[in-house]
Image: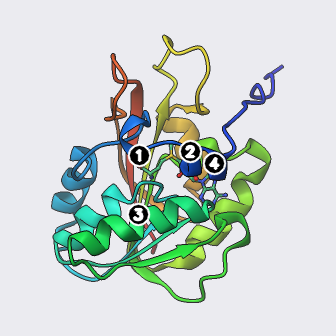
Amino acid sequence: MKRPAKPVEFPDWEKLYNEEEFESMPWYIAGMDPDIEAGLRYIAVTSGDVLDIGTGPGTQAIALAEHGFHVTATDLSASAIAKALKAARKKHLDIDFITDDILRCKLDRQFDIVVDRGCFHVLSPAMRPDYVHTVHGLVRTGGFLFIKCFSKMERTMKDGPYRFSPDELAGIFGKRFIVEYTEETVFHGTLTPLPRALFSVMKKL
Ligand SMILES: C[S@@+](CC[C@H](N)C(=O)[O-])C[C@H]1O[C@@H](n2cnc3c(N)ncnc32)[C@H](O)[C@@H]1O
């Protein structure tokens, strides 16, 4: 019999972002994540509306805005949103930063690309169906969903986010999206070694 995934503990996100500097966080990367960059090359989309879910430090939102996208970025943590907004303003970038829980999402519009770098993999398994339903509603028909999450291949870290195999991701998202590709990669950030990760590009038909 298949055992249920072990419950995982996560930080109090608001407390974390209120007390810590972005640069100290394991997922912090100064520019665009190379897998997101590769995903954009693959779909050959260079403009349009992008939503960055669980934006945290806002690094991907900022990089996407610098690439010419019109970016909306959300996070559960109001402190993360306030600090990310400040970082974007310093660069004279106009990004819609909104405090929002993806599981009680207030957004009422759709996007050409929805990016999730590290939010989906911190949601409890019971929340996944709601997440997929919400995200499906946020992507325009013909648009794309990028998911970056920990891989089942990550075996050195004791704690941390939920891990997935490419087949599991296909099982979770496959009824709502066409999986264009899922590849094994690393979660770029401040940890050594970098944790093993998956990056998946999916299309809403
Ligand atoms: C691992 S961090 C990744 C941050 C950012 N995407 C990055 O790549 O730097 C996960 C983020 O998801 C956010 N988060 C967790 N649960 C959330 C939820 N239910 N709705 C929105 N954001 C959430 C956290 O506040 C945190 O910023």
Q: Which residue is mark 2?
A: 19
Circle 2: element type: helix
Residue 174 visible in rendering: yes
Measure the alpha-carbon separation of dots 3 and 2.
14 Å
Pointer 3: residues within 10 angstroms few (<14), some, or many (20+)?
many
| Amino acid type, mark 1 | Phe
Residue placed under numbered mark 1 in the picture: 22
Badge 4, how many Cα within 10 Å: few under 14, some, many 20+?
some
- In the rendered image, residue 197, in percent from the top left (x then y), is placed at 41, 32
Q: CA distance from mark 4 to mark 1?
A: 12 Å
The residue that disc 3 covers is: 84
Q: Is 39 placed left or right of 124 in the picture? A: left
Upstream in sequence: badge 4 or badge 3: 4
From mark 3 to mark 1, how far is it between C-alphas? 9 Å
Q: Choose between 109 and 11: the one closer to the eye.
A: 11
Q: Nearer the viewer, mark 2 or mark 4?
A: 2
Q: Position of residue 87 (x, y in %)?
A: 32, 64
Name the secondary structure under disc 1: helix
Residue flagged by tag 4: what amino acid is it? Trp
Depth check: give the residue in front, 92 or 6.
92
Tag 3 secondary structure:
helix
Q: Quadrant of residue 104?
A: bottom right
Closest to the camera, between mark 1 and mark 2, is 2
